[in-house]
Amino acid sequence: MKTAKSVLITLLLITGSIYAIAQKGQLTALQEIGDGSVFKKYWGITKEGDTYSSNASSEMCQIKFENNVNGKFSTFVLNKEGTNTVLINSGFGFLKPNHYTEPSAFHSNRHNLAYVYIDGLLYALKGIRDPKNITTFKIEEIFALSKPAKGEHTSGKAAAKEIKNRNHDAVLEKYFKDMKAVQDNATANFTPEIIAEVDAVEGNEKAKDKDIKDTNAAYWASAEGQKNLGEMRQEKIIFINDTGADVGMCYGQGVSTVLKPGEKHTFSCKNGKVYRGEKIPNNTVNLKRTDKVLLDLNGTNCGAQITASSVL
C-alpha cells in the first residue's frame, strides 16, 4: 500500500515530466515526431468541469517541415494526408515562429492564430495578437498525433484521450511562461553567426514584402488596374420598395430575393440586370425570373436611388 508521501512523490514526478516536455521549443518538439507525421483534427473544444469535450473530424492531416532562407527548419504546413491540399499555410503572413532558435509558437498575423505542439497535441489558439507575449488565448482546434514519423510518442488513442483529460489551459499557460525565460536566455546568448542568420531572415521577409507591394502598385497603376479601381469606386445603386406589396428580384447567378415594403437593397452599378421575380408554388426559397427588367446595371446610373414604383 502506497503511503501519502509516496503518492505525493509520484504525482510530482508525473507533473514534472509533463512540464519538462512542455519546456521544449517547437522546433525540437516537432523534429522529435518527424516530418510527415499524421494528425487527426478535433474541433468544438469545450470544458465541462475538469474534463474537455470535442468533435472529431474524419480529416487526417500531415505535417510538412519548411526551411528558412538559411536552410534551417523554421515552420510547417499542414496538408490533407497523402495530398498537396493545404489546410494550414505557411506563406503570406502565416505561421512565423515567435523566436528564431526557441519558438514557443507559430503565429498567423492575418488571423491572430497561433499553433503550439505539446506532447501529442497540436493546438490551434485564437485571439493571439502579440505572439511574443501570449497571456490569453482560446483553443480553436486540437490536432491529435495519430502516426508519428519517428520515435516513441503519445499518439493514436493515447493522444485522443489526452484531449479529454489534460488540463490544457494550465499546461499552455505554464508552457508559455517557461518558454519566455528560455527565449530570453537564448537571445542574450546569440552568437554573431546566429545574429547574422536572424538578419538574413528579416531581410528576406522585408524583400518579399517590398516585392509584393511593388507588384500590387504596378498593377493598380496599369490600365487594367485603373479600370478595375474605377469600377470598384463607383457609387452603388439603391433600390427602394416604396410600394405596399412585396417585390421579387432575380439577379446574378440564380440569386433571388424578396424586398418587403419599405426595404432597400444595394447593387453594384455595373453588374448585369435585375429582373422581377415571381413566387413558385410550393417553393419558399427560389423565385421564377420574369422578362421584366427592374434595373439595368450598365454603369450609367451609379449613385442613383431608384424606387420600385417607378419601374414596375
Image (spheres, helix red, strand yellow):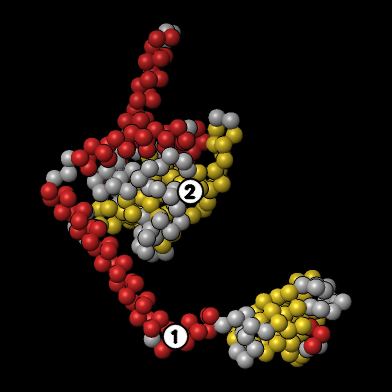
Whether residue 17 is visible to the viewer of this picture, yes or no, is yes
Q: Residue furthest left?
A: 192
Q: Secondary structure at mark 1?
A: helix
Whether residue 32 is visible to the viewer of this picture, yes or no, is no
- Work out whether mark 2 precedes mark 1 in sequence or the reverse, and give the earlier one: 2
Q: In this picture, is 118 found above or below 227? A: above
Quadrant placement of the C terminus: bottom right
Drawn side of residue 219 relative to residue 150, left or right? right
Mark 2: few/some/many CA within 10 Å (<14, 14-19, 20+): some
- Closer to the camera in the image, 122 or 172: 172
Query: x%, y% of residue 70?
Result: 19, 57
Q: Which residue is mark 2?
A: 127
Q: Amino acid at mark 2?
A: Gly
Q: In this picture, is 240 found above or below 58? A: below
Q: Within the image, what quadrant is residue 278 found in? A: bottom right
Residue drawn at x 62%, y 91% is 300
Q: In this picture, is 71 found above or below 248? A: above
Quadrant placement of the N terminus: top left
Query: x%, y% of residue 63?
Result: 36, 53
Residue drawn at x 27%, y 64% is 206
Q: Which residue is mark 1?
A: 226
